[in-house]
Image (cartoon, helix red, strand yellow):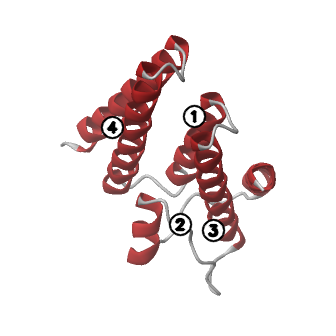
């Protein structure tokens, strides 16, 4: 199931690339409702709207595929069926899918806050597993790097938002 979600993410990403290359106007301009903004800032799936244009539908579909992929990857990682690398990759795909929704600084800060909170909680779990002898020092170092990267991105977005 996780590989299907990942394949869907890749398909929607490729369709978005094609649409960007074909469209002379700026397709990156997407208007979002408050409910959509809340779902993007969290790990919720987005509903496709009747009035959504093709670009917005693809953004939502890719977002939903990334969220599903991450949820499945997280469950598989917790059960020992997947490595931390796969989990970290799914976290990055969610981040990238969310950031595509626009240039709104407040939304980006919310996205980076969610990303940082995720990296921090995964890092704590890895640390517990390392102390119990389940995870390696390398995986612990990777988790710390992911956490620091997430915190740096959050701080950069906050600094950029300040006038």
Q: How many angstroms separate mark 2 from mark 4 (CA)?
A: 23 Å
Q: Nearer the viewer, residue 108 or 131?
A: 131
State the CA–CA distance, disc 1 to disc 3: 26 Å
Query: Where is 140 relative to 13, above or below?
Result: above
Disc 1 secondary structure class? helix
Q: Residues within 10 Å of mark 2 (few under 14, many from 20)?
A: some
Side of 116 relative to 26 (left or right) = left
Q: Is residue 102 visible?
A: yes
Whether residue 60 is situated above or below residue 162 in the rendered picture: below
Hey, which quadrant is residue 62 in on the image? Answer: bottom right
**Residue at the extreme bottom of the image, as rendered:** 50
Q: Earlier in the sequence, mark 2 or mark 4?
A: 2
As drawn, 154 above or below 130: below
Res 88 label:
1
- List x then y, in percent, for residue 44: 50, 66
Mark 3 and mark 4 residues within 8 Å of each other at the beta carbon: no
Horizontal relation, residue 45 to residue 149: left or right: right
Query: In screen coordinates, is 29 left or right of 54?
Result: left
Pointer 1: residues within 10 angstroms few (<14), some, or many (20+)? some
Q: Which residue is mark 3?
A: 56
**Closer mark to the observer between disc 1 and disc 4:** 1
Earlier-in-chain disc, 3 versus 4: 3
Q: Residue at x 65, y 53 (%)?
A: 72
Contact (Cβ within 8 Å) of mark 3 with mark 2: yes
Secondary structure beneath dot 4 equals helix
Measured in 3D between alpha carbons, the distance from the residue under mark 3 to the one under mark 2, in whole angstroms, is 7 Å
Tell me how many marks there are.
Answer: 4
Query: Mark 2 — residue?
Result: 30
Checking the image for residue 154, the label placed there is 4
Earlier in the chain: of badge 1 and badge 4, it is 1
């Amino acid at each position: 199931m996780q590989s299907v979600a990942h394949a869907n993410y890749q398909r929607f990403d490729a369709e978005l690339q094609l649409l960007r290359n074909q469209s002379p106007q700026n397709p990156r301009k997407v208007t979002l409702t408050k409910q959509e903004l809340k779902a993007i800032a969290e790990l919720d799936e987005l509903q496709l709207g009747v009035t959504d244009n093709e670009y917005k539908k693809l953004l939502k579909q890719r977002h939903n595929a990334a969220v599903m992929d991450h949820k499945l990857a997280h469950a598989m990682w917790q059960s020992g069926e997947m490595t931390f690398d796969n989990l970290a990759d799914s976290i990055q795909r969610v981040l990238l899918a969310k950031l595509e929704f626009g240039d709104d600084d407040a939304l980006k800060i919310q996205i980076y806050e969610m990303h940082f909170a995720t990296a921090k909680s995964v890092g704590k779990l890895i640390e517990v597993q390392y102390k119990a002898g389940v995870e390696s020092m390398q995986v612990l170092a990777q988790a710390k790097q992911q956490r620091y990267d997430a915190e740096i991105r959050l701080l950069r977005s906050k600094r950029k938002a300040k006038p």
